[in-house]
Image (cartoon, rainbow, N blue to C red):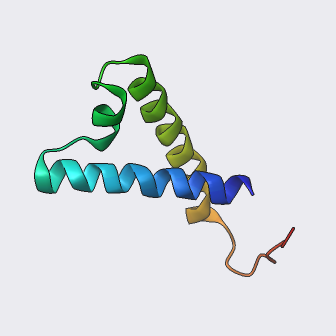
Amino acid sequence: MLDKIALILVIIGGLNWGSIGLFGFDIVAWIFGGQLTAGSRIVFVVVAISALWCLRFLFRDDEEPVHNA
């Protein structure tokens, strides 16, 4: 479950970066009222931690069984 949450947060971060690159528009900053507000900074940090968590997917054995719970 934690893997899915981390992946969702990384996707949200990627979409936000895409929005910045394509349109110069930071969705997270817009929602929270600026890039340096506490809300925006918390979201940025949580997305970064999720990205670090997802790094382990690169080193996972492809033959590892999937646990559906």
Question: How far from the left and from the top, in percent, is residue 29?
Answer: 30, 32
Considering only vertical position in the picture, is 56 above or below 31? below
Question: How far from the left and from the top, in percent, is residue 51?
Answer: 50, 48
- Residue at image point 67% right, 78% down: 62
- Residue at image point 14% right, 57% down: 22
Considering only vertical position in the picture, is 31 above or below 66? above
Q: Quadrant of the N terminus?
A: bottom right
Considering only vertical position in the picture, is 53 above or below 35? below
The extreme bottom residue here reads 63
Question: How far from the left and from the top, in percent, is residue 39?
Answer: 44, 24
Q: Quadrant of the C terminus?
A: bottom right
- Residue at image point 36% right, 28% down: 32
The extreme left residue here reads 23
Q: Nearer the viewer, residue 39 or 46?
A: 39
Considering only vertical position in the picture, is 46 above or below 65? above
Total labels: the figure holds 0
**49 left or right of 41 in image:** right
Question: How far from the left and from the top, in percent, is residue 13?
Answer: 40, 49
**19 left or right of 10 in image:** left
Q: Nearer the viewer, residue 25 or 51?
A: 25
